[in-house]
Amino acid sequence: MKKKTAPDWNTLGSATRALHSGIHRTHQRENSLAMFLTSSYVFESADQARAVFADEEEGNIYSRFTNPTVAAFEEKIAALEGGEKAIATASGMAAINTVFMSLLSSGDHLVLSRSVFGSTTNLANTVLARMGIGVTRVGLSDLDAWEKAIRKETRIFFAETPANPTLELVDIAALAQLARAHGILLVLDNVFCTPCLQTPLELGAHITVHSATKYLDGQGRVLGGAIVGEKELLMKHIYPYLRNTGPSLSPFNAWVLYKGLETLPLRMEKHCDNAEQIVQSLATHPKLNGRIRYPGLPGDPQRAIAQKQMRRFGGVMCLELENRQQAHRFIDGLQLATITANLGDTRTLVTHPATTTHGKLSPQDRLQAGVTEGLVRLSIGLENAEDVLADIHQSLDQI
Ligand SMILES: Cc1ncc(COP(=O)(O)O)c(C=O)c1O
């Protein structure tokens, strides 16, 4: 049978890449991806086992580090993100921890944005501190602060843009230039945008990390994570850590995520359409008095950065209410939106970050991350935008 040659993914649009990359058919000629639920693989002979273990022959060994379904997901996310290689992990935090543990040693130094997901701050404050890794936290958009924080031991700059939940941005190209000028690796958490809206590797970042649990799955079903970047960097430093410590993605979750990626470009457009419509309508709401956070808002000081590096502005928005009591009353008054700590689902989700995702931070760390008591995060889903808007209006009317 004539084998088809793979196209050059970089010449194709993201919808095409999402659908056609990472296809590996078995001899059964299945159309949809096959799922390999196996923990290990069988060898023809003891010598074949020896040869595969010795890297003399290619082949699967054990699903902690080689699984065809996981590999197909890795190929698809790499094709979307424009990276040479991806390594899948069991969750977004497993991806972030794997990057830190693979690339940092005792005595090294990390510069970390103050505005990151709560567990990332906790990881730095606890595990990294215990291992003797120095951490300096800086304001996300303050490039001078990033520069001033550099020491001769600095190995990594880590940032999220847009940040969870404040939606603050950093100029990725400028931060990458600074990092590269000092031989530092820039690692960017691209969860809020996904590769459909922003491709940090093209802007100079070395590595992107994902919580695939969010938009990549997009339907609130499974946990997963991914690390994407240059093949040599990933294979030399990150793959051995994954192989030996096992924060691996399960083949079942990889299959779900692979199917999720197929519709990612389509879903991201609709998330953006809905969020834009809702933000526009709430901009003049008297109870909010303009206290809405959404990247690219007219008049926002970071609008130029948003326009420069994001194709569209995403599905997450925040409302800033007066205090915790108001925020809780607004959340409880919503009829359609569900209260949960996740984001990037088909359904609209609402979260009070100060008492949930960022609840374990010290009050000082929380404020430095921009997480006020009145902040409410809305992850806008794929419903009819008018219905979500009506729900928000009726709840705002009650407070
Ligand atoms: C921006 C960001 N990064 C990382 C994570 C961690 O991902 P996971 O929950 O898959 O471990 C989250 C989770 O909410 C997140 O929002």
Image (cartoon, grey):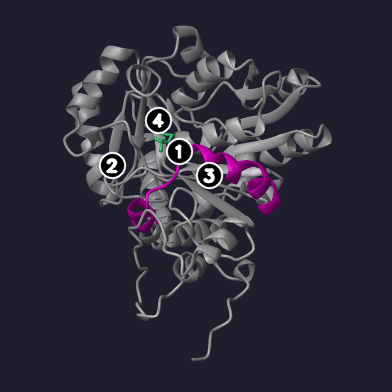
What is the secondary structure assignment of the residue under circle 1? Answer: helix
What is the secondary structure assignment of the residue under circle 2? Answer: loop
The mark nearer the N terminus, 2 or 3, is 3
Q: Which residue is mark 1?
A: 92
The range drawn in magenta is 231-257
What is the secondary structure assignment of the residue under circle 3? Answer: helix
- Between circles 1 and 4, the one closer to the viewer is 1
Say what amino acid the circle numbered 2 marks.
Answer: Thr
Residue 124 against residue 68 in the figure, above or below: above
CB under 8 Å between discs 2 and 1 = no
- Between circles 4 and 3, the one closer to the viewer is 3
Q: Which residue is mark 2?
A: 348
Q: Is mark 1 within 8 Å of ligand 1?
A: yes
Q: Which residue is mark 4?
A: 318
Q: Taking 119 as reference, is 159 left or right?
A: right
What is the distance, in whole Å, between disc 2 and disc 1 at their CAs? 21 Å
Q: Taking 42 as reference, is 325 left or right?
A: left
In magenta segment, residue 253: yes
CB under 8 Å between discs 2 and 4 = no
The mark nearer the N terminus, 2 or 4, is 4
Residue 384 at x, y percent in the picture:
26, 52
The mark nearer the N terminus, 1 or 4, is 1
